[in-house]
Image (spheres, coloured by chain):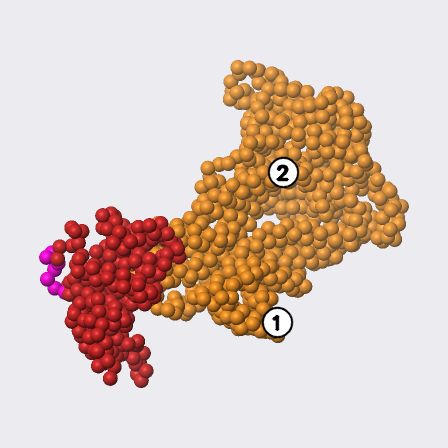
Chain colours: A red, B orange
Amino acid sequence: MTLAPDPSSAPAGPAARAVDLVKTYGKGATVVHALDGVTMQFAHAEFTAIMGPSGSGKSTLMHCMAGLDVPTSGQVFIGDDAIDALDDTGLTKLRRDRLGFVFQSFNLVPTLTAAENISLPADLAGHKVDDAWFDFLVDQLAIRDRLTHRPTELSGGQQQRVACARALIGRPDLIFADEPTGNLDSKSSGEMLSFLRRSVSEFGQTIAMVTHDPRGAAYADRVVFLADGKIVGELASPTSDSILEQMKLLGS
Amino acid sequence: MWKATLKGLLAHKLRLALTAVAIVIGVMFVSGTFVLTDTLHNTFTSLFNGIYQHVDFEVRGKAAFSGPAGTAVRNPIPQSVAQTVGGVRGVEDAVGGVQGFAQLVAPDGKAVTTSGAPTIGLSFNPVSQMAALHIRDGSPPTSPDDVVIDASTAAKYHFHIGDRVRVLLIGPPQTFTLTGIVRFGTANNLAGATLAAFDLPTAQKLFDRVGQYDTIDVLARPGVNLAQLQHAIAQVLPRNVEVVSGQTVAKENTNSINQALGFFSTALLVFAFISLFVGSFTIFNTFSIIVGQRTRELALLRILGASRRQIFRSVLLEAAMVGLVASVVGLALGVLAAVGLEAVLNGFGFGLPSGNLVFQTRTVIVGLIVGVGVTVVSAVSPARRAVRIPPVAALSDHDVAGAESSRRRIAVGTALGGSGVVALAVGLTAPAIQLVGLGAVGIFIGIGMLAPLVARPMSGVIGRPLAAMLGIAGKLGRENSMRSPRRTAQTAAALLVGMALVSTIAVFGASVSRSATSSIDQALSADYIISSSSTAGGGNGEISVSTASAAGRVPGVTAASTVYSGEFLFRGSLSTLTAVSADHLADTIILRMNSGTGAPALAAGELLVDTTTANSDHLTVGSSVPVKFAYTGNSHIHVGGIYEPNSLLGSFLVSDRFYQTHFDNPLPIALLVRTTAGATPSSTRAITAGLKAYPNLKIQTQAQFKQSQQKQVNQLLGLIYVLLALAVLIALIGIVNTLMLSVFERTHEIGLLRAVGMRRRQIKAMIRSEAVILSVFGAVIGIVVGTGLGVALAASLKQQGITDIVVPGSNLIVFLIIAALLGLAAASFPARRAAKLDVLAAIAAQ
């Protein structure tokens, strides 16, 4: 398959990294540390799962990494570029050209068809869609017969596959997946996670996935555990069991 | 992004369609006005060009000065001039003509009246090539007993050739034989005027022009150099007589018609502007709502890489598309409206010449620019709000409120409103009508921006009785209207403007009406006011001179004063001169003299001026002032007295005898009659009997005269209200829009209420309460603002005769009630929709 990027052409450094990220809300006595000095890296063609209980800071971490939220201190790099140096236009371009998103609630534009949703980032950028890549993704995700349908006419699993194609269409440096299976049944969840896994292994895609499902996290190359805004553990080549064990450990 | 915009448009079809109505109506006004006036302009131009096509020159008296609305005041020329001109080499024919007052009496004995157009009498030009009038049926007038009349009048009043026709003239009425029916050029009559034509010697006698002509039409020999001929004719003319080409006369006639059309189109365009202005509030509100509703979607687009500019442009593009579609519909409807209006005018007796509809490119361009422009400009602020939506809003569960500082809004609103008040004040005192309009716009926008400040407390107060009356449903409606003060204020803003304009007109109209009656009370002591029935309410319709002596012969009449009114130059500026009889002055007129004398000064041929003029021109009794009359030229006149201003009397007063000697064949506009018994039915009967030879007279007691003055004001008010009703309609659409959104947003909540046992009727009552609160809120502020504007407007026109300022409280309360009812009506569809929601589906919705 020649469509996947050649891994050897990937730059040497990590796809993204966070350096000593701190995010606080409120002031004085009511201050909340959503992130409390998080430093981590996302290597190229690596599938990272971020786990942690509610309020552990997973979403905040992702928002800060994607330039959607501004950290109180610390730095975020996408590739070699520090995003705190970017203005709104720069951030917009960054999101458009170098990041992809998959959300728990699918977040498709309800007025556009599936095909239009997939090509939306390219349309926004004024780029031509890579037709071969589009066809390939559509076939891989088995949504060809749904392309002319609106999101409301699709099942949850189909919607999430459309969202997945949308995230992948621009071959971004990094895809953020925020609880991508949170609204899916177990069968659809499995298909979705397998596809994400394949896109990392076969197409060299880099993915950061926030989840609290140990079975989902087991598809990742690495699991990072977060609690109270801090990294509290890490697990390479995880399995469901090893993750559960780690969680139990952390929960105590 | 194009695609997303278009699809977004389609998704909000209903809401946008409702919004578009505002633009459709505004553009319809604009295009209808243009099409109608362009068409009329075109037909009149070709009509006059056709009429003067074969008249090479017209010889006429030089204009003494320009009268009102650009009409020239000219003197007649001696008959001998026609012979002189006829003798010039190259002149084929020179035919004199005269014009004057001739009002027909219909077969049923009633005078033929027009809606404001003159009743013209003229001489029939036998040289058919040059004639303006063409015989359609019958034969031209050839004897002193003959008359021909225009085709529209003949058809409307069932005149037939051979009929004996009574005609009211300067002197006593006479009866003629109808020998023919004429057309004016290609038209059946001239813009509603009635025409009666006689042979030349008869016309000269009837119009007091023996030995004189008003104009001489000149036909050149074929092949003659016209420029040289015009020069040759000019050489032989006496002083104060000029020769102009037929084209020039045609152009002058066209221009004066165009000027009249200009006023008409300006008036219509003002209403177009009002509709669009009110509409812009509705558009602003709709787009704010749409942006609010699409917060998540817009934020999502931002996450996926849409730039701020793309978001901004997409909202504006959406507005432009709506504006474009609405403008096109408006343009088309405008053409229909023009056709309809033309038919209405014809129905009122304006014999408009038929012509093809003129649809100029300018109409399309202006319509599109105005329609699209207003929509886009109104959407700028919502678009800016859309831009400020943070991308992360797509991910959070709760709405991230578009954080716009209300402090900035208050500052801008205060500044706008404040400068509006200043502009209005300056404009009213200057006076500069554009500044007044600009000021009003500033005030409305300013108040629109400040209204959210009071929306919550006012909704609370307005809603309290509803809550008390309707229980929980009313209470929830009240809460809902208080929940988002900004939205409440935005929704009510359009209605606010509409109600403010209606109230302004109500206050202004009541003040005009009251001022008119009080000026009658203060100026008239006569028991009867006799005027022409041609124009409603004793305006400028003319009556025969001989009516005065006829009235004087009626038993019981002690005084009959003729009233004249005409233009003269007072110290070089065009002014209106009024004349009354000096004899029995106190029996007909009340003059409150500040200095000098009344009747004796008038009898001595002196001028009376009011104190306003005396003060501004530094005049005292005995001052000699230069004046100019068209008929007699320049002279000086002594000021014999100074009286308290009165709008009925005007600023300059002379005796009827003085007037008759200084004006050419003047016709009175009214008779003032005093009787021994006062205004009693028997006096009325006696006067009616004594004047029955003049069926064009309207005999009114002082009380009836007052009523007819008020009726005139009220008729005009009625017309304005109808046009403003469109603005209110547009405002209502905004309310429907907001309520629909309210229902949509609270689907879950409504489902919940239904689930816990709220009945459909109660749901409806809740939505209706909200609607009533919204509209009453807008109406209350609007009425307060409008009353202020109306008082300011009336106060600024004190010099023009608005001496009394009246706030018609009962009318304003009626407006408030109507607003509440309209609110109820606006709620009917949204309420039904809310009541129909499926309980289970509604609860599931989120």
Q: Which residues are magenta?
A: A8-16
The amino acid at mark 1 is Leu
Residue B137 in magenta stretch: no
Q: Are marks 1 and 2 on the same chain?
A: yes
Please tell me which of labels 1 and 2 falls first in the chain: 2
What residue did someone put label 2 on? Answer: B343
- In the depicted view, which residue is nearer to us: B713 or B234? B713
- In the depicted view, which residue is nearer to us: B397 or B379? B397
Q: Predominant secondary structure in magenta?
A: loop
Quadrant in which residue B468 is drawn = bottom right
Of tags 1 and 2, the one toward the viewer is 1
Chain assignment, label 2? B
The residue located at (87%, 51%) in the rendering is B681
Residue B285's x, y, as percent? 47, 59
How many numbered marks appear? 2
- Where disc 1 sits, the SS reads helix
Residue A61's x, y, as percent? 25, 71
Above/below status of B221 relative to B782:
above
Residue B435's x, y, as percent? 50, 55
Q: Is residue A103 visible?
A: no
The amino acid at mark 2 is Ala
Residue A11 in magenta stretch: yes
What residue did someone put label 1 on? Answer: B470
Residue B63's x, y, as percent? 60, 34
Answer left or right for A128 relative to B383: left
